[in-house]
Image (tube, coloured by chain):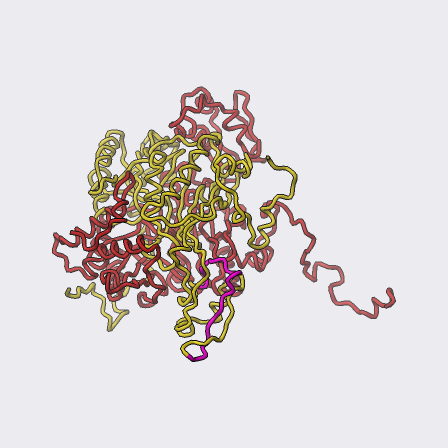
C-alpha cells in the first residue's frame, strides 16, 4: 500500500521508456518489506516520501527543495550537496535529503562486486536511490541524512577504495569517453589521462580554492562523444597530425557494397546504394578528397572532421602521429551566455606522465585564481581579459589556427616595447613640430 | 533505529582516515576482452539498433548491447543489472555518457541469450527495464538534470518530461532511420547541468517572473553586495525599506531589466523566482558537439515558452516529435538538425515546421545579438 497517493506520477508508469516512477515505487516497496531485516540508517520511507513530495510538485508546478545547506565531510569542501525539503512534516523521510557524489571510474566501467558494494552501503545508509550518473559524471547517491555522511565516506574509502567527487568552486569530477578501450577512433588513452589527472589533482578536487567550478573532459577523437568542448572548461579532444591511413582494397569493398557504410548506422532506411562521391567526397567540408577508382586525400587540407572515417571505418584509420587538441572555456548560459571551448593548444602528444598537459593546466589555474572574479568561469575570464592574455600566461605562441578569422576592427593593444621609441614623449619636442 | 558505525570515530576524525584516493582504477573493471584488446581495435559495426560488435586486429570480438535507462535508478534496479552482468558478462558492465547501460559479451550466441533475457524485463507498471537501442542514426538516451526530484532552482521537472518525451520518440530509439543521430537533452534551469546548449534538440526550463524579495530575512541570510553583483543586467540595487515599522537593509529589483536567470537566487535564498504560472521551458534546436562535417555549434531557441503540463507535458512532447519528423523528412543523409536548418535557412526551418516566429526569438542579449541579425539582402521569401 503506497504511503502517498500519486495519481499524476502514476501516469508516468505506462509507455515503453523505463519509468523512474515504477523504479522508485519498487524501491519503496522493497524498503517497506525489508526482506533482509536491514536496520536502515536513513528513513525507511525515503523513496515513498520522495514520491509524495514529487507528486506535490507535479500538482503545484513548483519545487519543494530548499536552498542549499552546508554539509560535508571533514577536510573536504565538496562532494556532498546539502538538501532539505520545505515540507518536512508532510514528508519526514526526505526532510534531510543530501546528495553524495562518488567519483566514478574512468570510462564508467564497473564490476558487479563493486556496484553491489555501493548498493549495500547506500541501502543501509541512504535512500537507496541514485543517479547513474550525474551530468558531470559522478555516481550520485541521492538522499541521506547528515549523521550518515562521515559513515558513508568511511565505508566508501575503507570498503570500496573509492573517493568522493567534486562540487563547488573546485575541480569537478573529470570524465572521459571509452576511448581506446573499445573504439578504433581514439587517438589517446582517455581513461589513463582522466584517471591520472583526477588523482594528481585530488587537492584541487576536494578543497575549493578556485573562483568557480572547473571541469575536465576527455574525448578520444573529434566525434566528441562526451561533448568535451561543450561541457568542460578544459576540453581535451584527440586528433592526429599526419595522413589518414587508407586501405584501398577496403575502400573498393565499400564502393562495391560489401561493407555497410557508416558501420550500419543508417540501416533503418533505404538511402539507396552507397555512393562514395555523394556521401563522402562531396560531404567533405574541405573538399580535400577525390575518387577515381582509388581514394585520394590531400591531407594538408584535411581538418580531421572524421566524416570519411565514420562512413568507412574499415577502410580508413586516423593517422599514426596521434595526440590531442586542447580547447578552453566552455560553459552553460549562467552568467554571460553559453560558450563552447576555444582552441588553445592545436596539438599536444598525450604521453605519460602528461607533463606538457599539466603545465598548460597549472598555468591556467595560476592565472585564473589570481585574476578570476568570484563565480567567474575561466571562459568568462578569457573574454574579459582577452585571448592574448591567455596565450601569454600559458606561454603559447599565437598561430592562425587559434582563430576562425582575424579581427575586423583595428583596436589593437600594442605593448610599449612593440612600438618604436616607446610611449614616453616630450610635449615640447612635439610642439616644435606642431604649433598649438 | 540503532546507529551502525562504519568505524568512524567522531571524537578522532583523523583516526584511520583515508582521503584523496580518487576513483577506483578502470583497470579493475575492464571486461577481459577489453583489457586484451585496448588500443588494438580494428573496426566496429552496428548489427541492429542497440547492438554493436567491435572487432580487434587479432579477430577477437566484443559484442555490446546498449540499453536505455532512467538516470534516476534504485539500488534494486542496479542489482538487477548486476544479476544480468553476472549471468551473461562475467560481472562486467558499463554506463555511457548518455545514461545508457552497456552489457558486453564475447560471442554471438552469448549476445543472443543476453538480448533475449533483457527483452522480457519489465517494471510492474509495464514499462521496459532495459530497452535496447540508441545507436547510429537514432535518438539516444536523453541527458537531463534533477528537476523537482532534488533541486532548489528548477523551472520545470526533469525526469518526468524526459520520460514523456522518450515514450513519444521511442520508435526512434529502437530504429536507425533518421538522417543522422539526434541528441536530446533537458536542463531544468539556465544553470544547465548538462550540454543542452549544444544538443540537436534541447529543452531548457525558464522562469518568467522576477524574484520576490523576502524582505523579512534578506539581510540575515544574504550578503547584499553579492546578490547585487550576481545580477548580469544590473537589475538589483541595495536599498533601505520599511518592514514591520523598521528600516531594514534589503534590495530592490528593476523588473524591466530582469531576464529571470536566477543567478541572484543562487547567491541569495531570499530572492526566489519559482512560480507555477511563470515557469516552463524553451525548445532549442540545432546544436552539436561533434566536429563531423561542420564545426560544433550552439543550439538556437525556436520556441520561446511552453508551460509546465505535468505529468506528461503534451504540448512539449508534441512539438519535439513534430520537429523531429519534419527534420527526418527533409534533411539529407548525414545532416544533423543544425546543419539542415543552416542549409535551408532558419526562415525555411520556421516555414517547414510551422513554428511561429515571435519577437522573443530575436537575440537582444549583448554584443553577440548583432551577429545573429541579417546584414544582407540574401534571404528567402
Q: Is residue A322 visible?
A: no
Q: Residue at x 54, y 36 (%)?
A: B348
Question: Is B202 one of the magenta-colored residues?
Answer: no
In the image, residue B283 above or below residue A173: above
How many numbered marks have been drawn onto this rendered protein structure?
Answer: 0
- Give the left or right position of residue B171, taking residue A128 as reference: right
- Give the left or right position of residue A300, taking residue B15 as reference: right
In the image, residue A109 above or below residue B52: below
Which picture quadrant has residue A161? Answer: bottom left
Question: Is B258 one of the magenta-colored residues?
Answer: yes
In the image, residue B31 above or below residue B366: above
The residue lying toward the viewer, choosing from B379 and A406, is: B379
- Give the left or right position of residue A91, taking residue B364 as reference: left
Q: Residue at x 53, y 59 (%)?
A: A381
Q: Colour of chain B?
A: yellow
Question: Residue A158: image x %, image y %?
Answer: 24, 59
Q: Residue furthest bottom?
A: B246
Instruction: Locate the C terminus of chain A and report the quarter of the image it occupies.
Output: bottom right
Question: Residue A299: image x %, image y %?
Answer: 56, 34
User: What is the letter of the red chain?
Assistant: A
Which picture quadrant has residue B121? Answer: top left
Q: Residue at x 20, y 61 (%)?
A: A43
Q: Please report the bounds of the magenta region as a residue range.
A: B245-264
Question: Residue A233: image x %, image y %?
Answer: 47, 53
Which picture quadrant has residue B83? Answer: top left
Question: Residue A98: image x %, image y %?
Answer: 29, 61
- Give the left or right position of residue A99, taking residue B315 as reference: left
Q: Is residue A68 visible?
A: yes
Amino acid at each position: 500500500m503506497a504511503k502517498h497517493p500519486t495519481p499524476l506520477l502514476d501516469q508516468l508508469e505506462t509507455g515503453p521508456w523505463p519509468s523512474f516512477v515504477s523504479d522508485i515505487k519498487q524501491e519503496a516497496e522493497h524498503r517497506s518489506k525489508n526482506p533482509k531485516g536491514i536496520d536502515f540508517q536513513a528513513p525507511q520511507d525515503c523513496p515513498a516520501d520522495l514520491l509524495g513530495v514529487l507528486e506535490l510538485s507535479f500538482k503545484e508546478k513548483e519545487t519543494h527543495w530548499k536552498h542549499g545547506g552546508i554539509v560535508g565531510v571533514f577536510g573536504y569542501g565538496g562532494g556532498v550537496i546539502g538538501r532539505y525539503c520545505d515540507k518536512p512534516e508532510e514528508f519526514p523521510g526526505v526532510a534531510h535529503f543530501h546528495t553524495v557524489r562518488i567519483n566514478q571510474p574512468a570510462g564508467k566501467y564497473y564490476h558487479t562486486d563493486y556496484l553491489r558494494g555501493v548498493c549495500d552501503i547506500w541501502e543501509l545508509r541512504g535512500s537507496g536511490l541514485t543517479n547513474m550518473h550525474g551530468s558531470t559524471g559522478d555516481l550520485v547517491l541521492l538522499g541521506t541524512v547528515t549523521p550518515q555522511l562521515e559513515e558513508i565516506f568511511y565505508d566508501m574509502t575503507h570498503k570500496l577504495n573509492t573517493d568522493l567527487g567534486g562540487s563547488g568552486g573546485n575541480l569537478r569530477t573529470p570524465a572521459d569517453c571509452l576511448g581506446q578501450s573499445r573504439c578504433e577512433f581514439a587517438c589517446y588513452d582517455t581513461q589513463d589521462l582522466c584517471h591520472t589527472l583526477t588523482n594528481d589533482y585530488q587537492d584541487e578536487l576536494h578543497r575549493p580554492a578556485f573562483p568557480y567550478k572547473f571541469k575536465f573532459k576527455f574525448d578520444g577523437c573529434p566525434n566528441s562523444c562526451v561533448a568535451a568542448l561543450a561541457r568542460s572548461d578544459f576540453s581535451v579532444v584527440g586528433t592526429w597530425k599526419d595522413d589518414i591511413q587508407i586501405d584501398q582494397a577496403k575502400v573498393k569493398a565499400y564502393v562495391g557494397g560489401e561493407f555497410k557504410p557508416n558501420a550500419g548506422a543508417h540501416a533503418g532506411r533505404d538511402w539507396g546504394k552507397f555512393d562514395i562521391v555523394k556521401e563522402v567526397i562531396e560531404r567533405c567540408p574541405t573538399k580535400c578528397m577525390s575518387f577515381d577508382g582509388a581514394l585520394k586525400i590531400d591531407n594538408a587540407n584535411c581538418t580531421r572532421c572524421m566524416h570519411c572515417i565514420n562512413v568507412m571505418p574499415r577502410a580508413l584509420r586516423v593517422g599514426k602521429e596521434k595526440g590531442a587538441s586542447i580547447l578552453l572555456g566552455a560553459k552553460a548560459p549562467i552568467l554571460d551566455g553559453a560558450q563552447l571551448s576555444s582552441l588553445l593548444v592545436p596539438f599536444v602528444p598525450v604521453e605519460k606522465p602528461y607533463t606538457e598537459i599539466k603545465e598548460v593546466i597549472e598555468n591556467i589555474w595560476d592565472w585564473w585564481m589570481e585574476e578570476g572574479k568570484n563565480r567567474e568561469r575561466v571562459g568568462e575570464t578569457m573574454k574579459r581579459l582577452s585571448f592574448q592574455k591567455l596565450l601569454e600566461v600559458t606561454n603559447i605562441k599565437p598561430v592562425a589556427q587559434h582563430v576562425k578569422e582575424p579581427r575586423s576592427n583595428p583596436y589593437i593593444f600594442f605593448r610599449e616595447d612593440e612600438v618604436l621609441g616607446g610611449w614616453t614623449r616630450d610635449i615640447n619636442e612635439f610642439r616644435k613640430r606642431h604649433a598649438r | 533505529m540503532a546507529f551502525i558505525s562504519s568505524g568512524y570515530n567522531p571524537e578522532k576524525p583523523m583516526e584511520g582516515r583515508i582521503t584523496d584516493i580518487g576513483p577506483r582504477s578502470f583497470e579493475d573493471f575492464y571486461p577481459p576482452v577489453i583489457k586484451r584488446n585496448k588500443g588494438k581495435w580494428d573496426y566496429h559495426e552496428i548489427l541492429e539498433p542497440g547492438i554493436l560488435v567491435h572487432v580487434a586486429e587479432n579477430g577477437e570480438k566484443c559484442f555490446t548491447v546498449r540499453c536505455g535507462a532512467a538516470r534516476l535508478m534504485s539500488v534494486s534496479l542496479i542489482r538487477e543489472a548486476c544479476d544480468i552482468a553476472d549471468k551473461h558478462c562475467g560481472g562486467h558492465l558499463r554506463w555511457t555518457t548518455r545514461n545508457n547501460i552497456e552489457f558486453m559479451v564475447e560471442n554471438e550466441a552469448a549476445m543472443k541469450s543476453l538480448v533475449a533475457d533483457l527483452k522480457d524485463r519489465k517494471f510492474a507498471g509495464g514499462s521496459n527495464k532495459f530497452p535496447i537501442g540508441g545507436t547510429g542514426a537514432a535518438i539516444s538516451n536523453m541527458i537531463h538534470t534533477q528537476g523537482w526530484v532534488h533541486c532548489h532552482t528548477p523551472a520545470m521537472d526533469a525526469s518526468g518530461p524526459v520520460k514523456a518525451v522518450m515514450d513519444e520518440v521511442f520508435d526512434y530509439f529502437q530504429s536507425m532511420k533518421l538522417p543522422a543521430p539526434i541528441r536530446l537533452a533537458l536542463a531544468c534551469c539556465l544553470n544547465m547541468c548538462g550540454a543542452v546548449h549544444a544538443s540537436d534538440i534541447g529543452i531548457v526550463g525558464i522562469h518568467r517572473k522576477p524574484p520576490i524579495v523576502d524582505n523579512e530575512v534578506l539581510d540575515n541570510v544574504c550578503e547584499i553586495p553579492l546578490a547585487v553583483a550576481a545580477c548580469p543586467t544590473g537589475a538589483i540595487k541595495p536599498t533601505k525599506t520599511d518592514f514591520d515599522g523598521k528600516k531594514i537593509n534589503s534590495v530592490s529589483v528593476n523588473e524591466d531589466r530582469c531576464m529571470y536567470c536566477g543567478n541572484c537566487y543562487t547567491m541569495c535564498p531570499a530572492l526566489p523566482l519559482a512560480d507555477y504560472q511563470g515557469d516552463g521551458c524553451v525548445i532549442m534546436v540545432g546544436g552539436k558537439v561533434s566536429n563531423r562535417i561542420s564545426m560544433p555549434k550552439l543550439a538556437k531557441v525556436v520556441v520561446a515558452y511552453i508551460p509546465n503540463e505535468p505529468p506528461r507535458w503534451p504540448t512539449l512532447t508534441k512539438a519535439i516529435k513534430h520537429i523531429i519528423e519534419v527534420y527526418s523528412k527533409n534533411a539529407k543523409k548525414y545532416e544533423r538538425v543544425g546543419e539542415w536548418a543552416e542549409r535551408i535557412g532558419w526562415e525555411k526551418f520556421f516555414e517547414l515546421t510551422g513554428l511561429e516566429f515571435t519577437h522573443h526569438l530575436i537575440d537582444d542579449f549583448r554584443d553577440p545579438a548583432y551577429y545573429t541579425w541579417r546584414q544582407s539582402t540574401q534571404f528567402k521569401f
